[in-house]
Image (cartoon, helix red, strand yellow):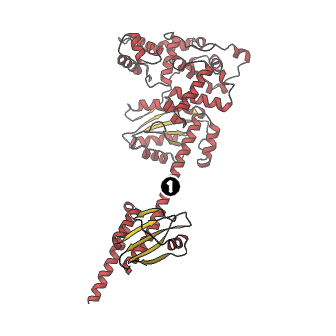
């Protein structure tokens, strides 16, 4: 009877430690160090897990017989027992993923190993092997996702600098056909910084690899989506519907060469989306000043202004143009993040363009004019060829801005400020002439700098354009002031 009871107790003990070991395989308990600590406590000894080079993976370091370890690592033996000076050791080979060699699990204690302790060591080695394989698979998955994300960012950066051929080559390997299009829309999805990774995964899921989804390198709460089709765009709205803290801004359809322009439009629409009940907005196609200019005069003037860049190597010219276009649209820091270069590189390239064109970007009017020329340059390839004689006598800026349609638009836009008793029109034209500097404007007007900023901010809803944030909206307003004569033309070569 006593023997039967002892057998039942032993059976319960076997079931108990086996169940505990199986618990270590649950998702919440998959930790190599925890398993090693559990084994040390279960056998009342010291346990160490090391890799094939002797590096500690878990447990407490202890002296081991080098010959036995070498035999285990190379696979000559699967396990070994060793005794010396009253210490008893068990060593078991633990296979490691993607490695011909293996790790070693060693257990040392003061008393000999009974069957229970020996079984615990053997089975724990098997569990550790599974956990190491799972950890390697998880790490490999993380590396793959990181590499894929880096590849998406590289494609976006190539699109931003108008290197469409290279962008298509890079995309073709993983996303065949994604960029087999001439045009696309850009969307920017915004949530919190903490939720950005989950938001990105949702965007990847709903677009089903039919769009380029990138975590914005400049804004940690933004996800950028370049989508050729309308289906992916509709699916992005479902993401916003499920997330009360998310917003969506979209661009008008643009050629791939104007991805940077489309991105700027999406960011502008995002600002509107924050005040919309559905948290979504698409860039409003309003009347842009360049559409009201004589196309032949505009293209001839832009080509003449940018002619000093024509002597550069093609890739250098494209690099300078793309960088300057982004640098004028955003801050140097954010442009650098989008392009994947340092901000000093962005500034150096823009300074080189300043020198070649003979302009100063500290002059807000000059920035607006160069911005107009750069955006016009994107379509120069589609414009009719201009004879050399005509290019030599290209129109000046005043002639380009003197068309009746443009002047009517400009007077209408600037005239919206007249009813305000604070004389917002005077503040704004002084602020533009001062290069957008509130302190210098305040000195010129004899008011406080905060008053200047409040006046400029008050002009934004009246003009329906962002001014303090800079970029395309501001440059349109500057062009309007140039066309009406409220602001003097910048100094340009020739």
Tell me if 161 is positioned left or right of 438 in this view.
Answer: right
Q: How many labels does the image show?
A: 1
Tell me if 81 is positioned left or right of 401 in this view.
Answer: left
Tell me if 247 is positioned left or right of 372 in this view.
Answer: left
Of the 4 image quadrants, the one containing the N terminus is bottom left
- Give the structural element (helix, strand or loop) at label 1: helix
Whether residue 36 is visible to the viewer of this picture, yes or no, is yes
Q: Which residue lies furthest to the left in this view?
A: 1
Bin the neighbour count of mark 1 within 10 Å (Cα to Cα): few under 14, some 14-19, many 20 and up.
Answer: few
52 w.r.t. 481: above or below: below
Q: Which residue lies furthest to the bottom in this view?
A: 1
Whether residue 417 is visible to the viewer of this picture, yes or no, is no
123 w.r.t. 463: above or below: below
Of the 4 image quadrants, the one containing the C terminus is top right
| Most foreground residue, 252 or 398 | 398
In the image, residue 261 lies at what x, y percent?
54, 30
441 w.r.t. 153: above or below: above
- Say which residue appears at 31% left-offset and 78% top-offset: 12
The answer to which quarter of the image holds residue 38 is bottom left
In the image, residue 452 lies at what x, y percent?
38, 16
User: Label 1 belongs to which residue?
Assistant: 141
| Most foreground residue, 147 or 247 | 147
In the image, residue 368 lies at what x, y percent?
53, 20
In the image, residue 352 lies at what x, y percent?
60, 25
| Most foreground residue, 396 or 60 | 60
């Amino acid at each position: 009877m006593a023997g039967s009871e002892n057998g039942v107790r032993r059976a319960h003990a076997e079931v108990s430690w086996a169940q505990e070991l199986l618990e270590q395989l649950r998702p919440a308990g998959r930790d190599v160090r925890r398993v090693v600590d559990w084994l040390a406590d279960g056998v009342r000894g010291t346990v160490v897990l090391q890799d094939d080079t002797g590096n500690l993976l878990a447990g407490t370091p202890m002296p081991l017989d080098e010959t036995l370890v070498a035999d285990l690592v190379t696979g000559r033996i699967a396990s070994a027992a060793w005794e010396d000076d009253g210490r008893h050791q068990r060593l078991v080979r633990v296979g490691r993923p993607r490695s011909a060699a293996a790790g070693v699990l060693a257990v040392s204690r003061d008393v000999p190993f009974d069957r229970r302790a020996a079984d615990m060591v053997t089975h724990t080695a098997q569990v550790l092997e599974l956990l190491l394989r799972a950890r390697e698979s998880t790490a490999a998955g993380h590396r793959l996702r990181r590499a894929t994300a880096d590849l998406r960012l590289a494609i976006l950066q190539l699109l931003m600098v108008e290197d469409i051929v290279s962008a298509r080559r890079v995309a073709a390997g993983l996303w065949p056909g994604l960029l087999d299009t001439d045009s696309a829309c850009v969307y920017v999805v915004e949530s919190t910084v903490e939720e950005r990774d989950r938001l990105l995964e949702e965007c990847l899921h709903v677009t089903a690899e039919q769009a380029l989804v990138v975590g914005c390198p400049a804004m940690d709460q933004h996800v950028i989506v370049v989508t050729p089709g309308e289906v992916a765009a509709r699916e992005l709205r479902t993401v916003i519907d499920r997330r009360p803290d998310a917003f969506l801004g979209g661009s008008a359809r643009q050629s791939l060469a104007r991805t940077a322009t489309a991105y700027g439009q999406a960011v502008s629409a995002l600002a509107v989306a924050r005040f919309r009940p559905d948290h979504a907005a698409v860039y409003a196609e309003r009347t842009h000043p360049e559409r009201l200019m004589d196309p032949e005069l505009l293209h001839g003037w832009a080509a003449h202004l940018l002619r000093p860049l024509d002597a550069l190597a093609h890739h250098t010219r494209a690099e300078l143009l793309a960088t300057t276009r982004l640098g004028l649209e955003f801050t140097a820091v954010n442009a650098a993040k989008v392009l994947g270069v340092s901000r000093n590189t962005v500034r150096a390239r823009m300074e080189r363009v300043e020198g070649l064109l003979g302009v100063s970007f500290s002059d807000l009017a000059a920035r607006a004019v160069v911005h107009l020329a750069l955006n016009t340059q994107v379509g120069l390839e589609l414009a009719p060829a201009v004879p050399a004689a005509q290019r030599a006598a290209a129109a000046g800026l005043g002639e380009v801005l003197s068309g009746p349609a443009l002047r009517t638009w400009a007077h209408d836009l600037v005239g919206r400020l007249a009813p305000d008793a604070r004389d917002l029109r005077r503040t704004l034209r002084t602020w533009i002439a001062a290069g957008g500097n509130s302190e210098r404007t305040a000195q010129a007007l004899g008011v406080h700098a905060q008053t200047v900023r409040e006046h400029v901010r008050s002009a934004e809803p009246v003009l329906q354009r962002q001014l303090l944030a800079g970029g395309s909206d501001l440059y349109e307003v500057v062009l309007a002031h140039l066309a009406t004569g409220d602001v003097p033309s910048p100094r340009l070569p020739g």
